[in-house]
Image: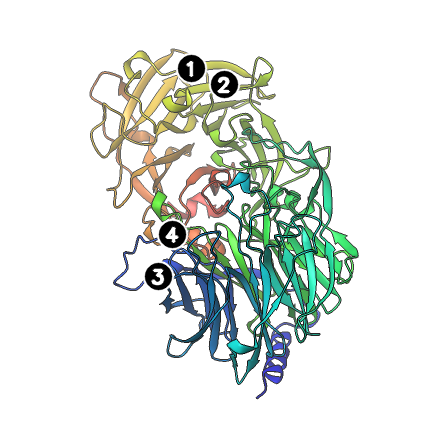
Amino acid sequence: MSRRLLLLTAALAASASIPAHAEGVFNRVATFPVAANLPADIDAATPTSSEIIAATEDGNMLVYSDSPLGAVGFIDITDIKAPKPGGIVKFDGEPTSVAVLGGKVFAGVNTSESYTNPSGTLSIIDIASKAVESSCDLGGQPDSVAISKDGKFLAVAIENERDEELNDGALPQLPAGNLKIFSIANGTVDCATAKTVDLTGLAEVGAEDPEPEFVAFNEAGEIAVTLQENNHIAIVDAATGTVKAHFSAGSVALEGIDTKNDGALSFTGKQDALPREPDTVKWIDNGRLLIVNEGDYEGGTRGFTIFDKTGKELYESGASLEMKIAAAGHYPDKRNKKGVELEGAEVGQFGDTKYIFVASERGSVVGVYKDTGGEPEFVQLLPSGIGPEGVLAIPSRNLLVTANESDLVEDGGVRSHVMLFERGEGTPAYPMVVSVNDDAGKPLGWGALSGLVADPQVAGKLYAVSDSFYRAQPSIFTIDTSKTPAEITTKLVVTRDGQPAQKLDLEGISSDGADGFWLASEGDAAKLTANAIYKVDAKGAIKQEIPLPAELIGKDGRFGFEGIATMGEGDDLTLVMAVQREWADDPKGQVKLLAYKPASKEWSAVRYPLEAAGEGWVGLSEITAYDGKLYIVERDNLVGDKAKLKAVYAVSLDAFKPAALGEELPLVEKTLVRDLIPDLKAATNGYVVDKVEGFAIDKDGNAFTVTDNDGVDGSSGETLFLRLGNISAMN
C-alpha cells in the first residue's frame, strides 16, 4: 500500500469512528512518564525530557527527542490507555527534533562544542532494530526536522543558536543559520543531495544572522521556516531550494493583560507593539499558515497568528487564549513579559473537522480550535503536564499527543510526561473549575486554592482561599458547584486598613455563621508571616487577629496552620486548626489539632496520629466539621507514581476532648473515610498531583475536594475539583 493510500485509509477510519453530526471533544486517556524508558544501567533519577514528538504511520509507536538525556525515545501506544516503554537510542550529542518515515526515524542531533563552532548530524535510526544506520553532516546546529507530505524531501532548520549570556543575547552572533533540504529515495536520505538555502539578507532584524527555528511542509512541496529572533518567515520551494517569498512576522500591541510579577493577577496592563517572534509554524492548508508567537528575544505577544503565504495577516488571537487560560486558573504570574508563552502547535483533520492546537509552555495547557477558514472557533482547553513542547495529531486513531519537556526530578517534583488525548463524544473532563469575567470583561484571576468551606445556608455554594503565592492579593472566592465546570463567581480581596492585607498565607477558611469568615494563615519566618487566625467581615476586611498563645511561640515551624473549622455557637463557639506537621514539642508522627474559644480566649489541643511517611513526608492539609465529626485531609508530598497517601480521615467529636496547653495532650483516634488517590487518577487520567488542600461538605451533605496548583510554578497548573458524593455514603 502506498503511503498516501495508507494515510487516506486511516483518515476514513477516523472519520467513521464518530458520527458526522456529533461534536467531538478531546479528553486525556493516559500519561507516560518518560523516565520509565530509562534502562537499568542509568540512574532512575537522571533528568530526562520529551520534546518534539512523532509517530509511526500506523500510529502505534511514538518517537520523541530527549535533549537532556542525549537520546531518542520510543513509546508503544498500541493500547492507548496503557502506554509501554519502547526503549531509547543514545547519542553523543543532543537530539533536537525527530521525524518518521516508514520504518525509520530521522533525528537532528546537536554536536556543537560551542556557540561559535556549531555542528550537528542528521541521524537515521531503524525503528525495528533501534540501530543508527547512517548519518549526514549538517555543518551546524540543527533544530526542527520535517518530511514532505509525499515523502520525497526532508528539511532541517540549522539554527546556530545565539549565546543568551553574550552581550545580553543581542544579534548578530555568527555563524549564521540556514536551511538544509535533502532528497529521500527508497525510504532514506541521500546525504549527497543536500541543498543549503541561504537565509541571510531577508529579515529586517539581524539580517546577517538568521536563526531558523521551525520548518513545516504543505502538500505543494513548499517549506515554511520561521526565523524567530529575526521575526521573519520564509517560504522555500523544496525541489529547487529557492526562496519563493518572505515577510516579517510583524508586531502586536496588547491591552488588558497582566504585566507585573507582583503576586497578584490583575489584567489591566498594556504592552506596546512588540515583535511576534514566532516559534512553531504549521500549514493549515496550502495557502494558510499558523505561527505561534513565543517572543523569545525582544517579543512577548503571547498569541498566535494566521497568515497567507504571501504574508497577508488573516487572523491574530491577541490575548484571547491567554484570557481563557487565566479563567481556568493556569495563568503563570512569574515572568509576565511573555505571559502564558505560547510555543507549540499542530493542525489535524479529524473526520470533517480540521482542528488547530496551540500549546502554552508556561500555562501548561493546549488550546483547541476548529478551523473555520476565518476566525478559529475555540473548543476547549486540555491539561498537558509541565511545559508542553511537542504537539502531535494522530487522526487515524482519534488521538492528540503532547510531549512535556520539564523534568523536576532534581527538586523532588514530577517527571517529564507524554500525554494522550482521545477524541470522542461526550463533554470535556477539564477544566473542572473556571472563573467568570469581571465588569471589565476580564477573568477573575485565581489559582493556588487551599482552604475550602461550604456556605451554611445554600447547598452547592462554597468558598475558597488562595495561599501566599498571590501574596499581594489574598482572596476569598465564591464557587458555584451547580455549574459544570464549577464557576468562581466572585473574588473578595482580604484587606487590612483598606488595602490588600500583607504577610498572609491563607490555608484555611470557615464560615462565621453569618456573612463573614474565620481564616487560618500559615506561618513562615522566611516570609515574615505568623501562624494566626483572622476574623473578616463580608467585605473581606480584617476585624480581629488572634496570634498563637505564648506557650507555642517559637515552637511552631515552617509547616503550620493548614485548615480551620468551627464548632458550636455563642460562648461555646470553638475554632479548630489543623497543624500540618510536627512542631518542636510534638512526638514524631503526631501533630496538633489546636482549639480556641473566642469568648474565653482559651487555647487547648489534642494530638493526631499521622500515617507513616514513606519517601517524602506526611502531614495535614484541611479540616472541616460536619454532623458530629471532624474530617481531616492527610497526605504525603509526593506526585505521580510515588504518591501513596491522599486521604480523608474522621475524628469523632465525642472523643475530641482537647486539653489545656502545657498539660498532657490526648491522642485522638481516626478512621479512614476515603482514599482520594483513585479519585485523583480517574478525574482526568493524569498523574497524581501533590496538594489536596481543600475539603468541604455542603448543607445537603455533598462532599467536595480541591487541589492547590501552586500558581503554575513548578506545577502542571491543574486544579482538580472533585465531587465526591454524599458524605453519608462514605461513613
The nearer-to-camera label among 1 and 3 is 3
Please tell me which residue is depicted at 53% across the width and 36% down the height of the picture: 334
Q: Which of marks 3 and 2 is nearer the N terminus?
A: 3
Q: Give the Cα separation between the discs numbered 1 and 3.
A: 49 Å
Q: Residue 36 carries which label?
A: 3
Label 2 vs label 4, nearer the camera? 4
Label 2 to label 4, Cα distance in Å?
Answer: 37 Å
Secondary structure beneath dot 3 equals helix
- The amino acid type, in three-letter code, at marker 3 is Ala
Q: Earlier in the sequence, mark 4 or mark 3?
A: 3
Give neighbour class at mark 1: few <14, some 14-19, many 20+ (Cα, 10 Å).
Answer: some
Residue to which mark 2 is pinned: 535
Q: Identify the secondary structure beneath mark 1.
A: strand
Mark 4 vs mark 3, foreground winner is 3
Distance between the alpha carbons at the discs numbered 3 and 2? 49 Å
Residue 546: give its label. Answer: 1
Label 1 with label 4: CB-CB less than 8 Å: no
Q: Which of marks 1 and 4 is nearer the N terminus?
A: 1
User: Which residue is tagged 4?
Assistant: 640
